[in-house]
Image: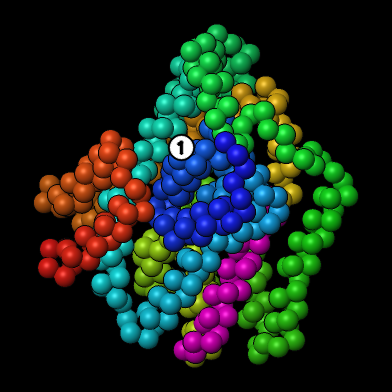
Amino acid sequence: MGKPSFKQALAFWTKLGFISFGGPAGQIAIMHEYLVTKKKWISESRFMHALNYCMLLPGPEAQQLATYIGWLLHGTRGGLAAGLLFILPSLFILLALSIAYVSFGQLPWVYALFNGLKPAVMAIILQALIKIGKKSLLSPFHLGIAILAFIGIFFFNIPFPLIILATIALAFAGRKLFPQWLGISQQASKKQQQDESAFYINNQTEVPNIGFNPARFWKQVATGILLWLLPFYLLYLLADDFAFWERLSFFFTQAALVTFGGAYAVLPYVAQVTVEKFQWLSRLQMIDGLALGETTPGPLIMVLAFVGFMAGYNYYDHALLPGTLGLLVTTYYTFLPCFLFIFIGAPIIERTKGNNHIRELLAFVTAAVVGVILNLTIYLGKAVIFPDGITWNGLDWMALGWIILSFIALQQFKVNMILWIFVSAVLGWLRWALGMA
């Protein structure tokens, strides 16, 4: 497989920005389907190596994974293109929906379109769960870790960072006490080796300028500080009531640095502070914002952009311009750390790909991720199949049927994913138009 041109990659990242529904599990599934299975731009082992690092970071792991892979393919400009295009479509769609929300109220036909997408997204997530599970659960110990991760997050609501720490501890203990459990079959190992040669980025690919470079590290840190200060200084010079914008900037920077475990882990904290303490929006508006965030492409953490919009809109007496600026400032300070984590950390992490101990450790993290994806599959599946509660009368038979049909179409008949997403959206609109939803 030859190196994809920057133009080819740009086309894919643009497309991804518009079809990346389904939260992190769905977004990772779409990237895996295109980058690993169809395009063969990156091998399974390198995809998982990047994913494992991103899962350890605060912030939206799918957006950071796109940035990481973009960097692997085309350096800094590739990482910027992938990361920004993952965000921008969602940003502009959410801005339009936010303006429509405060101007015209809720838009049922928009929700209908996106409700049609949800069963198809569930099928995509199921595909990812099966594919990643087959390639990650290579020993009884890996399978056990996946089961324990699922039990921990599903039944006991253990935060994801604690699950990762527990996984690492179990991996160390298992390696010392039961090394025979960690063995990977020769057949699985051979299959992994055979798979590598068909991909542009594979386990033998050497990325230039990797490892820790003090000069580069401090240059990147200084660049990050400058990028943080520049809009802050402009707000100080130009904005009315700078105290509001100062609070907005600091709060969402802080939120970006503590979002371990994904959007669902940080949203309760954001809701509590912005609704109860700052009173930037009402509780009902926060719930509506979550609904808007769920029905747009891009990372779910984009809900914070809606919060920023409502903060500016309400604080400045229902004015759209401050609301728009609030959305842009919130998005900027939420995602700036995400890019810094990748551009600073990825060259260091790339150095570890040849380290067997690190690779073995990250493989256990991947096994835990399988359990987490299963949890997300059930969590999202309940909302799609039982929208009015888990009762026999609350079962949405059409959604269940469309999940099954979507899975068969995508898995068995290899129907084009984008085409199927479009068909699913039209189906959702027809259900609403015919009064069936």
Q: Which stretch did the figure color magenta?
A: 318-342
Q: Tell me how the rendering is colored.
A: rainbow
Question: For the C terminus, which image quadrant?
Answer: bottom left
Residue type at mark 1 is Thr
Spot occupied by residue 112 in the image (x, y as percentages of width and height): 25, 66
Asked whether residue 325 is drawn in magenta, I would say: yes
Spot occupied by residue 373 in the image (x, y as percentages of width and height): 42, 39
187 and 53: which is toward the camera: 187
Q: Is residue 123 visible?
A: no
Please tell me whether residue 332 is drawn above or below residue 354 in the rendered image.
Answer: below
24 and 155: which is toward the camera: 24
Spot occupied by residue 121 in the image (x, y as percentages of width and height): 34, 50
98 left or right of 430? right
Residue found farthest to the top: 180
Question: For the N terminus, which image quadrant?
Answer: top right
Asked whether residue 76 is drawn in magenta, I would say: no
53 left or right of 15? right
Which quadrant of the view contains residue 235?
A: bottom right
Residue beneath the point at 20% across and 57% down: 388
Label 1 sits on a secondary structure element that is helix
33 and 144: which is toward the camera: 33
Q: Main secondary structure of the magenta part?
A: helix
Q: Is residue 324 visible?
A: yes
Residue beneath the point at 52% across and 25% down: 195
Residue beneath the point at 68% across and 57% down: 77
Which residue carries the number 1 mark? 37
Residue beneath the point at 64% across and 46% down: 73
Please tell me whether residue 180 is drawn above or below residue 220 in the rendered image.
Answer: above
Please rate how many residues cluster around mark 1, counting C-alpha atoms within 10 Å: few if below 14, some from 14 to 19, many from 20: some
Spot occupied by residue 94 in the image (x, y as percentages of width and height): 45, 71
